[in-house]
Image (cartoon, helix red, strand yellow):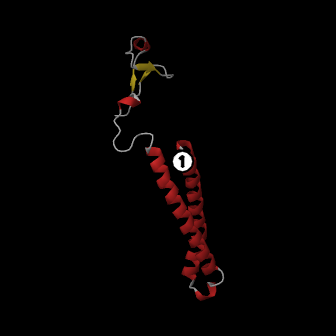
Amino acid sequence: MSSLALSYAPSSALISAAPARRPSRVSGLVAAAPAPAAAAAVDGPTAASAPAWEARRVFAWSRRAMGYSALVVAAAVVLAYPLAHKLSLPAQIVAHLAIPVAAGVFKLGYVARLAAQEALARVA
Protein backbone atom coordinates (compact mmCIF):
# COMPACT_ATOMS: atom_id res chain seq x y z
CA MET A 1 0.00 0.00 0.00
CA SER A 2 1.28 3.48 -0.67
CA SER A 3 2.52 5.76 2.07
CA LEU A 4 -0.31 8.19 1.38
CA ALA A 5 -3.63 6.57 2.15
CA LEU A 6 -6.86 8.54 2.05
CA SER A 7 -9.91 7.52 4.01
CA TYR A 8 -13.26 9.15 4.59
CA ALA A 9 -13.79 10.66 8.01
CA PRO A 10 -16.62 12.91 9.14
CA SER A 11 -15.56 16.45 10.02
CA SER A 12 -15.90 15.72 13.78
CA ALA A 13 -13.43 12.85 13.46
CA LEU A 14 -10.74 15.22 12.18
CA ILE A 15 -10.33 16.64 15.66
CA SER A 16 -9.89 13.23 17.27
CA ALA A 17 -7.65 11.80 14.57
CA ALA A 18 -4.44 10.05 15.62
CA PRO A 19 -1.29 12.21 15.69
CA ALA A 20 0.16 10.34 12.66
CA ARG A 21 -2.67 11.67 10.49
CA ARG A 22 -3.22 15.20 9.32
CA PRO A 23 -6.34 16.66 7.71
CA SER A 24 -6.15 17.39 4.01
CA ARG A 25 -7.60 20.39 2.23
CA VAL A 26 -10.51 18.29 0.98
CA SER A 27 -13.26 18.29 3.62
CA GLY A 28 -13.78 14.91 5.25
CA LEU A 29 -10.56 13.26 3.99
CA VAL A 30 -7.65 12.39 6.24
CA ALA A 31 -4.21 11.72 4.78
CA ALA A 32 -1.81 9.36 6.49
CA ALA A 33 1.60 10.87 7.19
CA PRO A 34 4.42 9.45 5.06
CA ALA A 35 6.84 7.04 6.70
CA PRO A 36 10.03 8.63 8.01
CA ALA A 37 13.00 8.32 5.67
CA ALA A 38 15.31 7.07 8.43
CA ALA A 39 13.22 3.94 8.86
CA ALA A 40 13.92 2.74 5.31
CA ALA A 41 16.84 0.31 5.09
CA VAL A 42 19.43 1.02 2.40
CA ASP A 43 21.09 -1.97 0.74
CA GLY A 44 24.22 -1.64 -1.37
CA PRO A 45 25.82 1.77 -1.81
CA THR A 46 25.05 4.49 0.68
CA ALA A 47 22.25 6.93 -0.06
CA ALA A 48 24.72 9.75 -0.77
CA SER A 49 26.77 7.79 -3.32
CA ALA A 50 23.83 6.16 -5.15
CA PRO A 51 22.84 9.27 -7.16
CA ALA A 52 26.47 9.84 -8.23
CA TRP A 53 26.78 6.26 -9.45
CA GLU A 54 23.50 6.50 -11.33
CA ALA A 55 24.51 9.86 -12.83
CA ARG A 56 27.80 8.41 -14.09
CA ARG A 57 25.92 5.58 -15.77
CA VAL A 58 23.44 7.98 -17.40
CA PHE A 59 26.32 10.23 -18.47
CA ALA A 60 28.09 7.33 -20.21
CA TRP A 61 24.86 6.11 -21.83
CA SER A 62 24.00 9.58 -23.10
CA ARG A 63 27.43 10.11 -24.65
CA ARG A 64 27.17 6.78 -26.47
CA ALA A 65 23.65 7.65 -27.66
CA MET A 66 24.85 10.99 -29.00
CA GLY A 67 27.80 9.40 -30.79
CA TYR A 68 25.84 6.58 -32.39
CA SER A 69 22.98 8.82 -33.44
CA ALA A 70 25.41 11.31 -35.02
CA LEU A 71 26.87 8.45 -37.06
CA VAL A 72 23.39 7.31 -38.08
CA VAL A 73 22.44 10.84 -39.17
CA ALA A 74 25.63 11.16 -41.23
CA ALA A 75 25.09 7.77 -42.88
CA ALA A 76 21.42 8.48 -43.53
CA VAL A 77 22.17 11.84 -45.13
CA VAL A 78 24.77 10.23 -47.40
CA LEU A 79 22.36 7.45 -48.34
CA ALA A 80 19.33 9.71 -48.76
CA TYR A 81 20.91 12.39 -50.93
CA PRO A 82 24.19 11.66 -52.83
CA LEU A 83 23.57 7.90 -53.16
CA ALA A 84 19.80 8.05 -53.63
CA HIS A 85 19.97 7.02 -57.27
CA LYS A 86 21.60 3.71 -56.28
CA LEU A 87 18.93 2.80 -53.67
CA SER A 88 15.44 1.39 -54.06
CA LEU A 89 12.47 3.51 -53.05
CA PRO A 90 11.90 1.66 -49.71
CA ALA A 91 15.60 2.10 -48.83
CA GLN A 92 15.36 5.82 -49.62
CA ILE A 93 12.28 6.11 -47.42
CA VAL A 94 14.10 4.40 -44.54
CA ALA A 95 17.11 6.68 -45.02
CA HIS A 96 14.91 9.78 -44.97
CA LEU A 97 13.00 8.61 -41.89
CA ALA A 98 16.23 7.73 -40.08
CA ILE A 99 17.37 11.36 -40.15
CA PRO A 100 14.74 12.88 -37.79
CA VAL A 101 14.59 9.73 -35.62
CA ALA A 102 18.35 9.75 -35.07
CA ALA A 103 18.27 13.51 -34.50
CA GLY A 104 15.64 12.96 -31.80
CA VAL A 105 17.80 10.32 -30.12
CA PHE A 106 20.71 12.77 -30.25
CA LYS A 107 18.59 15.42 -28.52
CA LEU A 108 17.44 12.97 -25.84
CA GLY A 109 21.04 11.97 -25.26
CA TYR A 110 22.06 15.59 -24.92
CA VAL A 111 19.33 16.36 -22.39
CA ALA A 112 20.23 13.23 -20.40
CA ARG A 113 23.89 14.27 -20.51
CA LEU A 114 23.01 17.73 -19.14
CA ALA A 115 20.95 16.22 -16.33
CA ALA A 116 23.70 13.75 -15.40
CA GLN A 117 26.32 16.48 -15.52
CA GLU A 118 24.23 18.63 -13.15
CA ALA A 119 23.72 15.70 -10.78
CA LEU A 120 27.46 14.98 -10.75
CA ALA A 121 28.20 18.64 -10.04
CA ARG A 122 25.82 18.58 -7.06
CA VAL A 123 27.53 15.50 -5.59
CA ALA A 124 31.06 16.86 -6.01
Tell me if I can see residue 97 in this picture. Answer: no
Mark 1 residue type? Leu
| Residue at the right extreme of this rendering | 82
Q: Is residue 95 above or below residue 28?
A: below
Residue 123, percent from left and from top: 52, 43
How crowded is the residue under tag 1: few (<14 C-alpha within 10 Å), some, or many (20+)?
Answer: some
Q: Is residue 88 left or right of residue 31?
A: right
Query: Label 1's element?
Result: helix
Residue 90, percent from left and from top: 54, 80
Question: Residue sitting at 57 percent across and 50 percent down?
Answer: 117
Q: Is residue 37 above or below residue 20?
A: below
For the residue pair 30 and 63, the one nearer the viewer reads as: 63
Residue 69, percent from left and from top: 56, 67
For the residue pair 63 and 73, the one nearer the viewer reads as: 63
Question: Residue sitting at 40 percent across and 20 percent down?
Answer: 21
Picture quadrant of residue 102: bottom right
Question: Residue sitting at 59 percent across and 77 percent down?
Answer: 75
Q: Is residue 77 above or below residue 86?
A: above
Q: Which image quadrant: the N terminus?
A: top left
Residue 71, percent from left and from top: 57, 72
Question: Residue sitting at 61 percent across and 74 percent down?
Answer: 74
Tell me if I can see residue 41 in this picture. Answer: yes
**Residue identified by numbered label 1:** 120
For the residue pair 16 and 38, the one nearer the viewer reads as: 38
* Number of on-image labels: 1
Q: Which image quadrant: the C terminus?
A: top right
For the residue pair 22 and 120, the one nearer the viewer reads as: 120
Q: Is residue 68 left or right of residue 43?
A: right
